Amino acid sequence: MEIRLLQYFLAVVQEENISRAADVLHVTQPTLSRQMAQLEEELGTQLFIRGRHLALTDAGIMLRRRAEEVVALMDKIEDEFQRQEEIGGIISIGSGGLNASKMLPAVMEGFRKKYPKVQFSLYTNSAEYVREQLEQGLLDFGLLLEPIDVTKFDYIRMKKKERWGLLLRAGHPLAKKESITKEDLLGEPLITTNRQSIQKELEGWLERSFSQLDIFATYNIITNVAMLVESGVASALTIEGAVNLFGSERLVFRPLFPELSMTSVLAWKKFQPSFGAAGRFLEYLKSMQ
């Protein structure tokens, strides 16, 4: 399958219309229609529900995701090899809401002063999604909250730890306390991470199973549940770094006691050569440690 076909497919998806996509691509409408029919024939499945506006079938939705990944990876490869003589291009970094990410602005700024043609692309999601993007080569670096499997990566363990606590509505009775104990969480509607490895760490601290808690909801990234905490329907177990993203006077963070802290790592794919902007950035980052 040619990359060009995937690029044409994504243009049709974006425009939801063959004629408009043909204009964008500077090809004729019959030519583009034949290309899409060829793609469906090659894959052996229908990709579009044809009507006034094109819609995607389930197969089309799956192909869209894969096509976006493939095209993004090809763009990244071309960008890296086109810029061998001068350091430039895009360095992609994934992270969640971590205290360790506070080191990034200074490092990024210092590196860009040395190499002004470099741009940064930032991706925010949970550790699993960031790790998946790293494995696929769509990210150069990822900040990952441990415990997480890093056998496929090289990494630097970050010095700043991630302290766990409870995110509360400011008027919540527990907000008057300086810290939150295990007993405080019993009977409290809670929102917690859906990462099983983290849940096991929390269960070790709680000395009881999650089944004994009142779990209202789970999340993959804390920003999705701030509105639930603000409304008072539940409180969220989270790390302090994620809370710093909100800056809301209606929310307060109270650390767990005894303290529960975890580490994070800055990871990149193993055997990645010191090549291009990402390689230089890694060298610069190591020199700052």
Image (cartoon, rainbow, N blue to C red):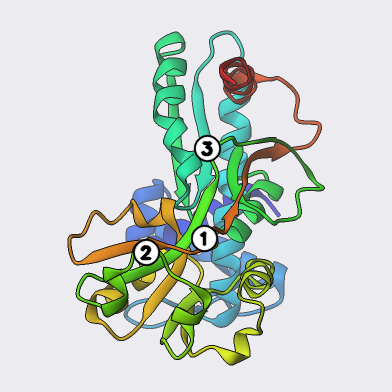
Instruction: From the viewer's perspective, tell me whether residue 116 is left or right of residue 149.
Output: left
Q: Amino acid at mark 1?
A: Phe
Q: Earlier in the sequence, mark 2 or mark 1?
A: 1
Question: Crowdedness of circle 2 by 10 Å Cα count: few (<14), some, many (20+)?
Answer: some
Q: Is residue 187 above or below residue 250?
A: below
User: Residue at image x 80%, y 46%?
Assistant: 152
Q: Which residue is mark 2?
A: 223
Marks 1/3: CA–CA distance: 25 Å
* Residue identifier under label 3: 92
Between residues 73 and 202, which one lies in front from this camera angle?
A: 202
Which of the pair 31/41 is nearer the observer? 41
Assess whether mark 3 and mark 1 are in contact (beta carbons under 8 angstroms).
no
Mark 3: which secondary structure? strand
Q: Earlier in the sequence, mark 1 or mark 3?
A: 1
Question: In the picture provided, is 159 more to the left or to the right than 27?
Answer: right
In the image shown, does 285 or 80 lie closer to the viewer?
285
Q: Residue at x 65, y 47 (%)?
A: 134
Q: For label 1, count other residues whose C-alpha is less than 10 Å away and answer few (under 14), some (14-19) or many (20+).
A: many
Q: Which element type, helix, strand or loop, lies under badge 1?
A: helix
User: Residue beneath label 1, please?
Assistant: 9
Query: Residue sitting at 50 percent across and 53 percent down?
Result: 163
Q: Disc 1 vs disc 3: which is toward the camera? A: 3
Q: Element type at marker 2?
A: helix
Q: Amino acid at mark 2?
A: Thr
Residue 81, compared with residue 68, is above or below; it is: above
Q: Position of residue 193 (x, y in %)?
A: 53, 71
* Quarter of the figure with the N terminus: bottom right
Q: Position of residue 192 (x, y in %)?
A: 50, 75
Front label number (2 vs 1): 2
* Residue 31 in sight here: no
Q: Is residue 135 left or right of residue 47?
A: right
